Image: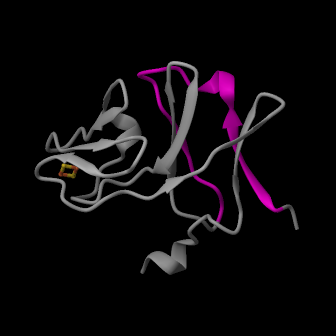
Amino acid sequence: MEDKIRLCSVDDVAEGFPCAVNPVGFIALAVFRVANEVFVTGNLCTHGNALLSDGYQEGDVIECPLHGGAFCIRSGEPVSLPCSERIPTYEPILENGQVFIRRARAQRVDEND
Ligand code: FES
């Protein structure tokens, strides 16, 4: 089995326009661009049922579209209430213009229950 999961192309992601990715069997992920850097986080807000990829990105901060809480894209730490729990972050692997994460680090859906 491949040790990496392909998420998207680097070109699919522009700053301010995160890419939502739903790898089969794994939690929903969001891929962000900040200048020339790429970041991967969980896509579900830890405060409620909202996708961060639908939110508003300002530099390395993503604001949730539902209640306006926010997270640092680099660390996953909450930076604005009502969010108080971090979102998972994943080291992106960039190869041939594609974004991957390590399969061993990805969180399966059933681990999230
Ligand atoms: Fe994200 Fe409430 S659901 S801040």
Provide residue 89's location: percent of width, then percent of height.
48, 53
| Quarter where residue 96 is shown | top right
Q: Is residue 17 magenta?
A: yes
Figure check: 90 above or below 36: below
Q: Residue at coordinates 58% horizontally, 52% vertically from top-left?
A: 22
Q: Is residue 105 magenta?
A: no
Specify whether 100 is left or right of 37.
right
Count of all numbered marks drawn on residues in the image: 0
Figure check: 78 above or below 46: above
Provide residue 51's location: percent of width, then percent of height.
36, 46
Q: Which quadrant of the figure contains the C terminus?
A: bottom left
Depth check, front residue: 99 or 75: 75
Provide residue 18's location: percent of width, then percent of height.
47, 31
Q: Residue at coordinates 41% horizontally, 38% vertically from top-left?
A: 53
Specify whether 47 is left or right of 9.
left
Q: Which quadrant of the figure contains the N terminus?
A: bottom right
Range drawn in magenta: 3-24
